[in-house]
Image: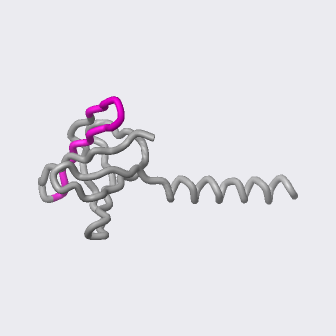
């Protein structure tokens, strides 16, 4: 019984932690703060959710390219309206 309760509690904690995680950075052209979900380096062609802190909105974008530098990762994405954005994400 105790194992079941513990397992459920751990499962809920891990699910909540994965939902709450995001990757912070900024838009290279506007310098506005953004966040990407999921919080991992995406692959080309993947879909990511980009949240703009300035407008407090979230859009789903397609990853066009990923360039890893020593301290940052530049993620080039296309929005649904075909707008290209370069997001500079900081490495943890």
User: Quadrant of residue 73 in the image?
Assistant: top left
Residue ranking furthest to the left: 82
| Quarter of the image where the N terminus is located | bottom right
Residue ranking furthest to the right: 1
In the depicted structure, whether residue 84 falls above or below residue 41: below
Residue at x 33% of width, y 37% of height: 72
The spot of residue 5 in percent (x, y) is: 79, 59
Residue at x 28% of width, y 44% of height: 88
Colour scheme employed for the rendering of this structure: one colour
Q: Main secondary structure of the magenta part?
A: strand
User: Quadrant of residue 55 in the image?
Assistant: bottom left
The boundaries of the magenta stretch are 67-80
The spot of residue 42 in percent (x, y) is: 35, 40
Residue at x 45% of width, y 41% of height: 92
Residue at x 43% of width, y 53% of height: 22
Report the front residue among 61 and 74: 74
Instruction: State left or right for residue 19 relative to residue 64.
Output: right
User: Quadrant of residue 4 in the image?
Assistant: bottom right
The spot of residue 60 in percent (x, y) is: 28, 57
Q: Reply yes or no: does residue 17 show up in magenta.
A: no
In the depicted structure, whether residue 25 falls above or below residue 92: below
The spot of residue 44 in percent (x, y) is: 27, 37
Q: Reply yes or no: does residue 69 show up in magenta.
A: yes
In the depicted structure, whether residue 51 falls above or below residue 47: below
Instruction: State left or right for residue 36 relative to residue 54.
Output: right
């Amino acid at each position: 019984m105790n194992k079941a309760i513990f397992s459920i509690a751990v499962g809920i904690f891990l699910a909540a932690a994965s939902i709450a995680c995001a990757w912070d950075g900024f838009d290279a052209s506007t310098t506005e703060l953004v966040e990407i979900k999921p919080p991992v380096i995406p692959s080309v062609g993947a879909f990511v959710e980009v949240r703009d802190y300035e407008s407090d909105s979230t859009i789903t974008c397609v990853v066009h390219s990923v360039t890893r530098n020593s301290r940052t990762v530049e993620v080039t994405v296309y929005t649904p309206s075909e707008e290209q954005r370069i997001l500079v994400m900081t490495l943890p």
